[in-house]
Image: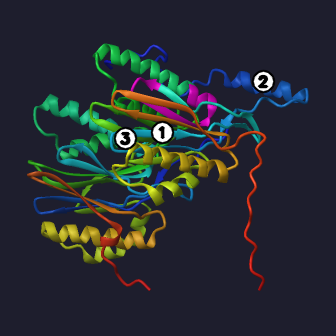
Amino acid sequence: MATLSVCQPQLGGFSFENCKRNAVLEAEVTKLGCNIPAARKTGTTICGVVFKDGLVLGADTRATEGMIVADKNCSKIHYISPNIYCCGAGTAADTEMTTQIISSNLELHSLSTSRLPRVATANRMLKQMLFRYQGHIGAALVLGGVDCNGPHLYSIYPHGSTDKLPYVTMGSGSLAAMAVFEDRYKQDMEEEDAKRLVRDAIAAGIFNDLGSGSNIDLCVITKGRVDYLRPHDMVNKKGVRCVYELEALPHQ
Amino acid sequence: MAKTKELSNDTTIIAIEFDGGVVLGSDSRVSAGETVVNRVMNKLSLLHDKIYCALSGSAADAQTIAEMVNYQLDVHSIEVGEDPQVRSAASLVKNISYKYKEELSAHLIVAGWDKRGGGQVSVRDLNGLLSRQPFAVGGSGSAYVYGFVDAEYRKAMSKEDCQQFVVNTLSLAMSRDGSSGGVAYLVTIDEKGAEEKCILGNELPTFYDQ
């Protein structure tokens, strides 16, 4: 292969080196009556939408450990290259490390080709790595960027399949966000409309999904400019009570 | 840690040979459990200019096989100096699927046109036998249309009849199979090249529907 990759030697399949050790440790810990630390997941709402001159990525900021909120303001929009960013849902460590590895490899690739990296390249690298691990890396990603061929948006699933679409949502709040998109998405939107649409989609996920919450982060990518808006909107301020008045149902 | 839910292309795919080429058709639904994650996925993947394959089964496995064979066919066609044959493409798909039979759960139908054999459809059976057939259906929706296809297929159909036949079959399968739906994608491959077409849900033919 022409690409240089430093972070990972190409070995066949999943490395099971530490599984025996982990099993022994787990047995010891259970004997003492404690639990092994659970993986921190980002029950999440992430989404992206392509508009006229670029694209908007959005994410909530809650990270959960089981039923407890572990981080009220975690950053789910990761840097891949100056023109490409990636939102991550699933296991927090997996999304963090996967995006860092591919960001590193993409920088080397960009240096060896003397060109700004393309979104399709990042997509290929991510899907080939995730497929190699057969879904055991729990990273569901929304990858977006603007390159010489225009704005591109991909959704990448943990098993290694990808979809290239004009609007995508991922995470536990994806259904709520997709409902907003399916209702209000139009081709060739203006930047402000696109930002409002993504903000509303993430808000739908935050309010209707237990695994999503806190603030809304946005990342607007256009040719030559990236606006990383963190936070863009704080919909759950501490100490502010939201009172909803439910309409009384008519008596039968 | 539990593995995440796999995406599947439980689907309807079909490929038919006519005099001078082939027509491939597919639905567009990708599901993860009960959720539809992509309602406009084009499951007809390009392997070479005049050779396409239809994907079904696990989305990740099918996409990966198609991309690997695309790469291998590009290298092979440069080595031989001309367009690859459909049987070469089918063999490459078969090599990967057979070697990793236990690990992969994808089923691809390969179809295309080459100057030596004309239009050809190649399909693998459950155990891995590669065979050339005049038509092939696959995916979860195929079970509902075997009768229709067996009864209505005629040899030496014209290109337009073939396209209509494929559209009718897809429409019937999509209305009966929960895992198939969305829009219908068609690819017609002949000597001149490949022509892609998309038929939206409301333009599909309707049959008896109470």
Location of residue A72 in the rendering, given as x and y in whole percent from the top left corner: 70, 34
Residue located beneath label 2 in the image: A24
Tell me the SS state at disc 1. strand
- Please tell me whether residue B83 is drawn above or below residue A85 in the rendered image: below
**Residue B143 can be seen in this image:** yes
What is the C-alpha distance between the residues marked 3 and 1? 30 Å
Residue located beneath label 1 in the image: A57
Tag 2 and tag 3 share a subunit: no
What is the C-alpha distance between the residues marked 1 and 2? 42 Å
- Mark in the foreground, 1 or 2: 1
User: Is residue A191 within the magenta segment?
Assistant: no
Question: Which circle's residue, 1 or 2, is located before the other in the chain?
Answer: 2
Name the residue: 51% across, 22% down. Answer: A100
User: Is residue A81 within the magenta segment?
Assistant: yes
Say if mark 2 contacts mark 3, CB within 8 Å: no
Name the residue: 76% across, 55% down. Answer: A243
Location of residue B144 in the rendering, given as x and y in whole percent from the top left corner: 41, 72
Tell me the SS state at disc 2. helix
The chain under label 2 reads: A
Name the residue: 87% across, 29% down. Answer: A34
Furthest residue toward right: A32
- Amino acid type of the residue tagged 1 in the rendering: Leu
Where are the magenta residues, as a range?
A80-96
Circle 3: is it few (<14), some (14-19), or many (20+) Cα within 10 Å? many
- Please tell me whether residue A238 is drawn above or below residue B129 in the rendered image: above
**Residue A132 can be seen in this image:** no
- Please tell me whether residue B29 is drawn above or below residue A26 in the rendered image: below
Tag 3 and tag 1 share a subunit: no
Residue located beneath label 3 in the image: B65
